Amino acid sequence: MPRAFLTGFVIVVFVCGCRPNSDSAATDNASILLDNFPSYTEIISPRDYEAPSLRAIGSYDDGVLIADFNSDNIPDFAAKVRRPLTGAETETIREKERESITFADAIVACNGPPASDGSCFELVKPTIGGIAGVLDFIEWGDDEQSLESPPECASKVDARSGQKLLTLVEVHGLCATVFLPLDGGGYDSCVYCAD
């Protein structure tokens, strides 16, 4: 008698939805980020499908990207963070979408541990429903400079050609946001898109 077998596939998406375990240095960085932005409750790690295309995947620990973003030879750290929507934000969403859109994401970074007052920055403001893309730390060269940008951005990024820069990349998209460290602290941002 013939038998039929049913097989299935399970896709696992890794999202760290909790405050990190306190047993590692990365945990300290994650805790510092969440403590400096207390309305955020989660660090969002790169998803499995995003990881292979990231140049800095080895620099991630518990969803936190750790690298020297401002060229001071001290490791800095950044992450995509998530929080529940406020009541006012929920009111801006169409009624039929309110059940599925319940959070806002932001991109935050802190310059070098220990993060003292004024050394943590919100790089991308809260975005209802999430932020497309993932953080990477890439050397800007010919490939990236073939993307189009506003002229004021091009000169800033061109001045750093060959240096690694903190970048929010859309893995399957056509745009990248480059975060340029400012001398007095903080970051400026420029958006590059394919033509």
Image: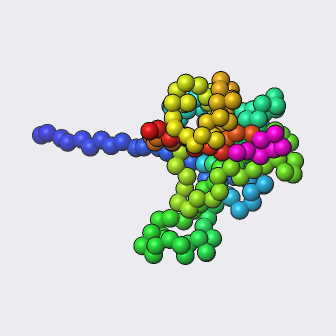
- Residue 60: give x, y in percent of width and height: 65, 35
The span picked out in magenta is 182-188
- Residue 93: give x, y in percent of width and height: 50, 71
Task: Tell me which colouring the rendered structure shows.
Answer: rainbow
Q: In which quadrant will I find the N terminus?
A: top left
Q: Is residue 79 left or right of residue 134?
A: right
For this orientation, the residue located farthest to the left is 1
Q: Magenta span has 185?
A: yes
Majority secondary structure of the magenta segment?
loop
Q: Is residue 178 left or right of residue 116?
A: left
Q: Magenta span has 67?
A: no
Q: Which of 123 and 190 lies nearest the eye of the viewer?
A: 190
- Residue 13: give x, y in percent of width and height: 49, 45
Q: Which of 175 and 126 lies nearest the eye of the viewer?
A: 175
Would residue 20 be seen by someone viewing this image from the given angle?
no
Q: Which of 18 and 78 lies nearest the eye of the viewer?
A: 78
